Amino acid sequence: MSTQKSGILLHISSLPSAFGIGDLGPGAYKFVDFLNSSGQSLWQILPLNPTGLVNGNSPYSSSSAFAASPLFISPQLMVKDGLLTKTQARVSANMDKTRVDYEKVCAYKKELFQGAYERFKKFIVKSAPCRNTYETFCRQSLYWLEDFAAFSAFKEYFEGKVWSDWPEKIRDREPKALRQLKTKLKDNIEREKFLQCLFFKQWRLLKEYCQKKNVRMIGDLPIYVTYDSADVWSHPGIFKLAENKKLDFVAGVPPDYFSKTGQLWGNPVYNWPALKSEKYVWWRKRIEYNLKLFDQIRIDHFRGFVDFWQIPAGEITALNGAWQKAPAKDFFTSMKKRFTELPIIAEDLGIITDEVREIIRYFGFPGMKVLMFAFGEDNPKHPYLPHNYVNNCVAYTGTHDNNTLYGWYEHDMAETEKKRLIAYLEVKEIIKEEFNWELIKLIMNSAADTVIIPLQDVLGLGQECRMNLPSTTHNNWQWRVLLKQLTPEITKRLSQLTLSANRR
């Protein structure tokens, strides 16, 4: 059996579902069947964490680095578990199956969840197995669950205010004040814990199905967390905050391919000396937790473990930042001692220093190669050209931040880039109907051990199906696939291509 593998990038939100957003229900299982039938052994997703309208629904901006988005809970599976009636889970006629309307979905599912929670409270009294399952989950998730549930309930109680603007005793986690408010909001806190328990039950079943179908899951772990999150409220000492616990510095990157003024992410940066003094316990818990969810994890912006772009809070662009050092070697040495395996993919795109490359090489992490970035210059030694790929890498046509292949060709490529691509393919002209398959074939036949293709590129879709446009906050993370698009013809062609490339 070949050690080279291939798979598909598709977020949970993009799965087929009648409920306005992809979920862990039947559509997910049918997608796993498609992966298996088309010869794909990997499924990569974006972060599972809760999203919010205030952050543009980005899975990279979340109220928790541990919790999962309740929006992905399947109403159909809730009906199967007796938590909802079929009438309660009736689909609204105006639910869009091709785009996610987050505002509408949030309102719809909030009502469903309240009904399910009311029924759950009756189950937990009558059913010992139900009660034991819930209590076991809460016990195993103690490190993060109680703080997340309290944070979510407090956030609602304080009408959406940022946690640093909460009453001082709650902001600073004064024990007596916390106990009193938790008692007052006990039901809301328990509801949040119930939803997390329900998500992870559904996730466990889906992952078991993936294993049965020989599909391994690749998760995505953003290096930074959101300031207005349970993590920063619960562990302020591991972040660089001012005395009033407001932001002191924020994260981002200097000017790059995506932005001439850099990217101002706004996340708090880590206080690495404090993390080191605590033996990196927060990060250790985070990695441990993700390795239970996934078979492999991609760490977004891996460079931040070596050095990070620190920008004074209040800046309007990322231009006035400065590089700061982080203890990458000590950190990953510590993690290696803790975990038997550390199956990490290092997102090493953009400007990468020799020091970052050395860390990646030293620990044996595969880096990333993105085909779309290979033709911007006339350089036959460009590391993203397929003939230059090393074995230990993960090759992509594009990522969630790129246009689709067709969108790239039709709207983003300069004429010089098109000429280089035509020359590289050794053809006289680009045939539009075959364009995506030619590029998929290129990286499938490369030396890369792992190839991941966004589903949009397999389906040959245009830029209207792009997942995200960096540095913008509207109309992102909305694209969805329909089951009818996963045709027998697509399945057969992808399977044949994968087999001819010896990736199954």
Image (cartoon, rainbow, N blue to C red):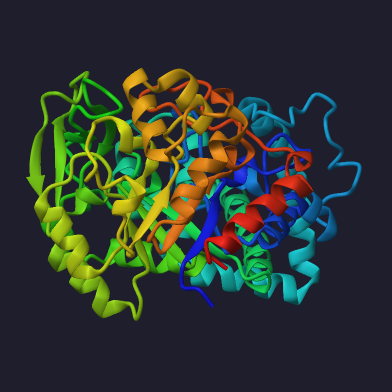
Instruction: Say which of 475 and 159 sits in front.
Output: 475
Where residue 186 sits: x, y (%)?
Answer: 57, 51
Figure disc tally: 0
- Looking at the image, which residue is at 28% across and 43% down? 349
Looking at the image, which residue sits at the far right?
87
One can see residue 92 in this view: yes
- Looking at the image, which residue is at 51% across and 64% down? 293
One can see residue 173 in this view: no
Is residue 410 rendered to the left or right of residue 98?
Answer: left
Where residue 136 sits: x, y (%)?
Answer: 58, 74
- Looking at the image, which residue is at 84% across and 42% down? 89
Q: Quadrant of the C terminus?
A: bottom right
Q: Which quadrant holds residue 175?
A: bottom left
Instruction: Say which of 362 and 94 sits in front.
Output: 362
Q: Quadrant of the N terminus?
A: bottom right
Instruction: Say which of 220 and 369 sits in front.
Output: 369
Q: Which quadrant holds residue 80?
A: bottom right
Where residue 91 sits: x, y (%)?
Answer: 84, 35
Is residue 191 rendered to the left or right of residue 314?
Answer: right
Is residue 298 rendered to the left or right of residue 326?
Answer: right
